[in-house]
Amino acid sequence: MHVHSSCVTKELSVGQLCIFSLLAIVVSEIAIRFTIRFFNIASWTTRFLLDCSILSLVTFLILYFMLYRPITRQLAVIRRNNEELHLYTKAFEKVREAIIVTDANNRIIRVNPAFSSITGYATEEVIGREPSILQSGRQSPEFYHNMWETLTKTGEWNGEIWNLRKNGQIYPERLSIVADYSESGQIQGYVGTFGDITNQKKHEKILEEKAHYDPLTKLPNRSLFNDRLRQSISLAGRHKRRCAMLFIDLDHFKEVNDSLGHDAGDNLLVQVATRLQACVRISDTVARLGGDEFAVILHELVNDTDATIIAEKIVFALREAFELGNKVAVISASVGVAVFPDDAMGIDLLVKRADQSMYKAKQTGRNKYMRCQATQFPQLLLSN
């Protein structure tokens, strides 16, 4: 940490001091001669003492302007600098954000107590080492390449990064790095400041879950489902693949709620969510749209029949009895299937046709899946 003081106020130059001293001697000599003539001083002893007193006065004035004033002003500047340095040191020691200072070779030369508090490393453990000891492995080499490229070009970098504490715990931090330039414009080191944003990330996750996930089943809600369906259709179109949507409505769920209570109904919905997730791949999406309505997105299908295979698997899975405490409930499901691009080319039409196919399954006895071909939809619309 460097403290740059302003230049000391200009004092009299050497030439000016010489002229001043010469004038003082001339004036003192005139004063001596005038005093001797006016007071008629004849004694050489008296004249000598008078000369000494006047010369002492001149010497005092010269020393005052040449030494005392410059020294006192420099001491005042040093005092101010020391006060500033004390203030900066206090801030360095007390600030809550971690501070790390490196030399031009990116070797750590100083850290503050907050650094040790956040990372778990004592000062003596990191001095002389590179900040890379904190890397967690979550960022790719390309990430660090881009970071240093920006830092070299602009002299600063800001962003979020995942780092590693001494105890092996990975944590998120908001990092800011600035380059320290010498008077010649060369980089002589770097100063980094960062703060642990673990609590902020937890809060953001809670807000995201409230905005995009069903609080009961923890499945994506309708908003997130629509976003993922839009992405799935776009990806399938780009890769010349298929994707499918399954619309699932539980049969006889109202009877469970009415006879066993809402707690039992909630328990059943959670178990339904678990069974649906077991029927699909990890890459697929299971969502709760609301009430007893669920939906599934099957991403990147090779064959259109893959969707009906999964739909049949779901029907069988939800047909099994559900244990709700000391009670048992038996329900079924009506599933509508729509495949992109075979049955519909856009998200709105795909959702509509999956919904229509589900209603067709309900109308024809429930406890089954239906996939109505494109030629069947006009007749289906009339019947609905």
Image (cartoon, helix red, strand yellow):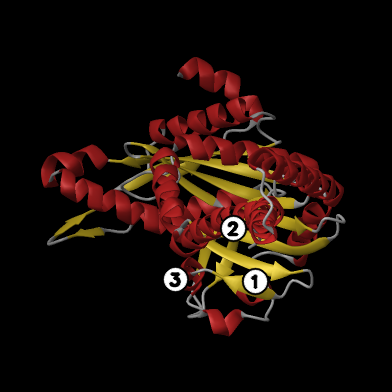
Whole-angstrom CA distance, mark 1 to mark 2, is 52 Å
Whole-angstrom CA distance, mark 3 to mark 1, is 21 Å
Residue under the image location 66 percent in, 33 percent down: 343
Q: Which residue does the numbered mark 2 point to in the structure image?
A: 75
Q: Which residue does the numbered mark 1 point to in the structure image?
A: 137
Kindly tell me whether residue 169 is visible in this rendering.
Answer: yes
Residue under the image location 72 percent in, 49 percent down: 7
Provide residue 278's location: percent of width, then percent of height. Answer: 46, 61
Identify whether 74 is placed above or below 227: below
Residue toward you, 328 or 67: 67
Q: Amino acid at mark 2?
A: Leu
First in sequence, mark 1 or 2: give its number.
Answer: 2
Residue toward you, 247 or 208: 208
Q: Which residue does the numbered mark 3 point to in the structure image?
A: 117
First in sequence, mark 3 or 1: give its number.
Answer: 3
Residue under the image location 57 percent in, 37 percent down: 227
